[in-house]
Image: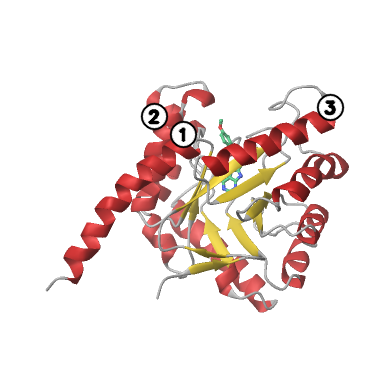
């Protein structure tokens, strides 16, 4: 018996760690040249990540960094829809990083497999869109406050039970609407309104989040907590700490890691798997 994540078209095998590759469709990451150029660049990036070993693509039209402005609906649709329309023709599951119900509806219509929502379906109408779909997968992430204010006043107290209880509530709300738990994955939301120490507490005690029995997704890639503990200020230079965090998250029970650096993460996880296989062999010996 091995777990799988049920999504629109794929039952994603969680017997080995899955690597979700990040695809940003934003004018700043794929400079000028207009909408067509950024679509083309994003699709090239999708193909590259698949070649590097990505198991899932995560396409997003809003770069959700602390303090970054929200993207208007029409702009997000214009960025994401043309990319998803083509990305679903590639051979891996397509996740879309959005919290807007209109974007969710549009991409599910195009055949997207997973809705990845930093708001955990708290925006009005989002629960309805996901529960109206017969099979799409969903990632529910914990976020304290909102992207504009989350780092102004981070969480206080013991974050681990708070994150767990929040996620449990969202799961209950969704399953009450008829969504099977096999479709749901949980995410502690690294960096979303937490201090550096709180983010690492969520890593150290990640096992406490496995209580609800749902798979965990962890997104440490390039985040500022990794900058804080390494002194690496440029996000683009945080590949090594990002890979380290991905391996640690998997070792602490994460089923999926969301990363920028797919090739390096896949290689690092091959080492973890070689160890893990032997650990299981040892455990089943009497
Ligand atoms: C996540 O953790 N994060 S968008 C700030 C950075 C680097 C990266 C420079 N969507 C997550 O990737 N979805 C985002 O510092 C997400 N889990 C899930 N499920 C933010 C991001 C980033 C922010």
| Label 2 element class | helix
As measured in the structure, the alpha-carbon distance from the residue carrying label 2 to the one carrying label 1 is: 6 Å
Determine if residue 144 is in view: no
Crowding around mark 3 (Cα neighbors within 10 Å: few <14, some 14 to 19, many 20+) is: few
Q: Which residue is mark 1?
A: 225
Height in image: 256 above or below 174?
A: above
Quadrant of the picture in which ligand 1 is shown: top right
In the rendering, which numbered label is found on residue 229?
A: 2
* Ligand 1 within 8 Å, label 1 CB: no
Farthest-out residue, right: 74
Q: How has the structure been colored for display? A: secondary structure
The quarter in which the C terminus is drawn is: bottom left
As measured in the structure, the alpha-carbon distance from the residue carrying label 3 to the one carrying label 1 is: 33 Å
Whole-percent x, y for residue 55 in the image? 53, 51
* Marks 3 and 1 in Cβ contact (< 8 Å): no
Crowding around mark 2 (Cα neighbors within 10 Å: few <14, some 14 to 19, many 20+) is: few
Whole-percent x, y for residue 112 in the image? 71, 57
Q: Quadrant of residue 154?
A: top right
Labels 3, 1: front one: 3
| Label 1 element class | helix
Height in image: 219 above or below 233?
A: below
Task: Please give left or right for residue 183 compared with residue 232 in the image.
Answer: right
In the rendering, which numbered label is found on residue 145?
A: none
Q: Which residue is mark 3?
A: 34
* Marks 2 and 1 in Cβ contact (< 8 Å): yes
The quarter in which the N terminus is drawn is: bottom left
């Amino acid at each position: 018996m091995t777990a799988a994540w049920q999504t629109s078209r794929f039952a994603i095998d969680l017997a080995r760690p899955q690597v979700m590759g990040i695809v940003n469709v934003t004018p700043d990451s794929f400079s000028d040249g207009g909408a067509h150029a950024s679509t083309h660049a994003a699709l090239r990036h999708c193909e590259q990540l698949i070649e590097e070993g990505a198991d899932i693509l995560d396409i997003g039209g809003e770069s959700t960094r602390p303090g970054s402005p929200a993207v208007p609906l029409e702009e997000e649709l214009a960025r994401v829809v043309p990319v998803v329309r083509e990305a679903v023709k590639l051979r891996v599951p397509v996740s879309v990083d959005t919290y807007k119900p209109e974007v969710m509806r549009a991409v599910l219509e195009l055949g997207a497999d997973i809705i990845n929502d930093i708001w955990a379906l708290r925006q009005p109408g989002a629960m309805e869109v996901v529960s109206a779909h017969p099979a799409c997968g969903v990632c529910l992430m914990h976020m304290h406050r909102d992207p504009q204010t989350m780092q102004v006043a981070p969480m206080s107290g013991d974050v681990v039970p708070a994150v767990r209880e929040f996620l449990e509530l969202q799961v209950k709300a969704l399953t009450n609407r008829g969504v099977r738990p096999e479709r749901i994955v949980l995410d502690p939301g690294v960096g979303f309104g937490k201090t550096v120490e709180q983010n690492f507490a969520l890593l150290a005690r990640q096992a406490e989040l496995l209580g609800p029995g749902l798979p965990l997704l962890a997104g440490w890639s390039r985040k500022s907590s990794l900058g804080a503990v390494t002194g690496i200020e440029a996000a683009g230079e945080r590949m090594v700490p990002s890979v380290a965090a991905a391996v640690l998250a998997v070792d602490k029970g994460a089923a999926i890691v969301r990363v920028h650096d797919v090739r390096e993460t896949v290689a690092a996880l091959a080492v973890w798997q070689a160890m893990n296989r032997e650990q299981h062999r040892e455990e089943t010996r009497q």
